[in-house]
Image (spheres, rainbow, N blue to C red):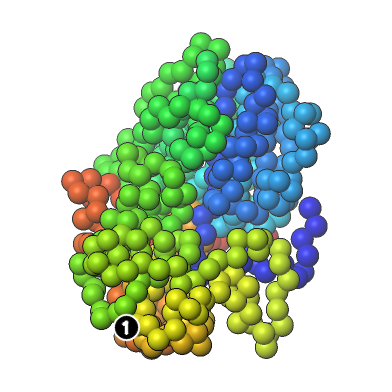
């Protein structure tokens, strides 16, 4: 798909300030159902997890057919494309690139032939040993068409199948002994669908029932969209097998601790999703309430940066008694392809996305709530917009701790130099964005939201405590592959 040189690379002005998730998965086993069309709707519900490319692979018991391309789900698939994908099961994928460049060859699912059949794979996450694995496989004669670690996983699984003498679930279990990092996977043969979650459970994956069939998705909101009943989350280290015999599962790997990415709750997941037993909106409101206990400037109103700060701002208002107002209106009709303004009109990019409501703001002392600050540039522009709208004081509350360390498990933070909190103190960040006050939710306060389960999350971006050791430069694979 043609990608104009005028595209705003970050999808929209507000997104320059946000971390980006790598991708979303949707799989379905439902003979007699229009599986390609249902996967299309499931991917539509997961579009927030990846807006770079989309793809669907469908199996009919004999062959696997594939359609994928660059672009949003609605851009990649036409009714004719979906009609050309008949089958009894499907796996779909939406993607942002973290490891591997943004090229059509890197779109997923990936499909290959092995000794006695076909194999499709879709992956959410990042391997931390992809470079060494790729080099070893290449030395043994493996060929690579893409620059992504997902193809490394596919090679490892295909080799473990030993030309078809092994069941695919046995090969996946063997592969889990070799690959290290964050991975939720959908693996599909001509007649079988597998859902796999890494032993730490870094990336989410859940299971649902649709009539006599089953659905697997990165988030429960996708199950709701296709009318599936939520059953449970896939457990860390679990391999779920779905075929004509029904559903069964077994352990493919063990770890010393669960470490679900805490940013799923802070920002990535859709507010109506439920992940590992926690409702996302309820968690975000609780974060806002905790923020109110830690930081209480003298202000007249609380406003969110929509939509990512809305739930936390409501929680803050509930706890503090300070009125909640919608002081910034979001233009939801600006897509990822709007023309970027000239450099001298750069602030216009933010104004196209957010517009201050002057009648609500003028003369007020305002507390603005957002979920995070990554680089600080957009936050500063919003603060200036509020002052131009007549706000007397602008204070900012952030419903997560400062992001100080990069993520190596599937979030787009390539280096510490891009993170403002890694270079500046909170006082210096406050000065940089031009706010009268600034407070980040403490790590202790964030974890308190989860009660007795506070130890089940990866917080490496805040404290540098990586649950899966980083022993090689995971960014090198992207550089070598481009």
Left or right: residue 3 versus residue 42 is: right
Left or right: residue 295 versus residue 51 is: left
Examine the rendered structure and indicate whether residue 465 appears above or below residue 106. below
Q: Give the labeled residue for mark 1.
A: 437
Question: Residue 307 or 15: which is nearer the viewer?
Answer: 307
Examine the rendered structure and indicate whether residue 108 appears above or below residue 4. above
What SS does tag 1 mark? strand
As drawn, the residue found furthest toward the top would be 245
Residue count near mark 1 (Cα–Cα under 10 Å), binned few <14, some 14–19, many ≥20? some
Question: Residue 215 or 227: which is nearer the viewer?
Answer: 227
Residue 193 seen from this side: yes
* Residue 364 position in % (x across, y down): 37, 83
Look at 32% across and 69% down and name the residue there.
323
On the image, which quarter does residue 401 sit in? Answer: bottom left
Left or right: residue 78 versus residue 413 is: right
As drawn, the residue found furthest toward the front would be 359
Examine the rendered structure and indicate whether residue 307 appears above or below residue 120. below
Look at 74% across and 32% down and name the residue there.
82
Look at 43% across and 57% down and name the residue there.
267
Examine the rendered structure and indicate whether residue 275 appears above or below residue 126. above
Residue 422 seen from this side: no
* Residue 2 position in % (x across, y down): 80, 57
* Residue 284 position in % (x across, y down): 34, 55
On the image, which quarter does residue 400 sit in? Answer: bottom left
* Residue 369 position in % (x across, y down): 38, 69
């Amino acid at each position: 798909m043609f990608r104009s040189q005028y595209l705003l690379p970050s999808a929209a002005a507000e997104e320059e300030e946000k971390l980006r998730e790598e991708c979303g998965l949707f799989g379905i086993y439902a003979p007699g159902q229009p599986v390609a069309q249902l996967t299309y709707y499931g991917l539509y519900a997961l579009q927030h997890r990846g807006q770079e490319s989309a793809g669907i692979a469908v199996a009919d018991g004999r062959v696997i057919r594939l359609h994928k391309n660059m672009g949003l789900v609605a851009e990649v698939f036409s009714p004719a494309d979906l009609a050309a994908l008949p089958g009894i099961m499907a796996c779909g994928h939406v993607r942002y690139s973290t490891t591997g460049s943004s090229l059509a060859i890197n779109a997923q699912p990936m499909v290959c032939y092995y000794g006695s059949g076909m194999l499709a794979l879709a992956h959410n996450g990042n391997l931390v040993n992809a470079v060494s694995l790729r080099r070893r496989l290449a030395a043994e004669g493996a060929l690579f068409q893409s620059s992504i670690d997902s193809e490394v996983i596919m090679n490892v699984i295909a080799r473990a199948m030993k030309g078809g003498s092994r069941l695919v679930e046995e090969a996946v279990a063997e592969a889990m002994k070799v690959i290290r990092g964050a991975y939720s996977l959908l693996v599909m043969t001509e007649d079988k669908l597998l859902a796999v979650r890494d032993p730490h459970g870094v990336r989410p994956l859940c299971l649902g029932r649709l009539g006599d069939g089953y659905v697997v998705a990165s988030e429960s909101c996708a199950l709701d969209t296709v009318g599936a009943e939520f059953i449970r989350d896939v457990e860390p280290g679990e391999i779920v097998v779905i075929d004509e015999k029904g559903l069964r599962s077994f352990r493919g790997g063990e770890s010393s601790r669960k470490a679900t990415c805490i940013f799923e709750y802070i920002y990535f997941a859709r507010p109506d999703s439920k992940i590992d037993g926690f409702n996302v909106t309820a968690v975000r409101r609780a974060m806002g309430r905790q923020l109110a206990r830690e930081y209480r400037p003298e202000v007249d109103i609380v406003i969110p940066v929509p939509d990512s700060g809305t739930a936390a701002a409501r929680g803050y208002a509930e706890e503090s008694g300070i009125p909640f107002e919608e002081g910034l209106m979001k233009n939801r009709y600006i897509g990822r392809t709007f023309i970027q303004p000239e450099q001298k009109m750069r602030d216009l990019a933010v104004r196209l996305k957010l517009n201050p409501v002057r009648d609500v703001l003028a003369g007020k002392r305002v507390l603005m709530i957002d979920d995070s600050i990554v680089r600080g540039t957009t936050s500063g522009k919003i603060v200036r917009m509020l002052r131009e709208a007549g706000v007397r004081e602008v204070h900012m509350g952030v419903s997560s701790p400062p992001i100080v360390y990069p993520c190596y498990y599937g979030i787009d933070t390539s280096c510490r130099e891009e993170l403002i909190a890694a270079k500046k103190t909170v006082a210096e960040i406050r000065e940089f964005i031009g706010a009268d006050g600034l407070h980040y939710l403490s790590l202790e306060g964030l974890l308190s939201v989860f009660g007795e389960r506070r130890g089940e999350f990866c917080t490496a971006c805040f404290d540098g405590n990586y649950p899966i050791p980083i022993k090689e430069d995971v960014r090198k694979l992207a550089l070598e592959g481009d």
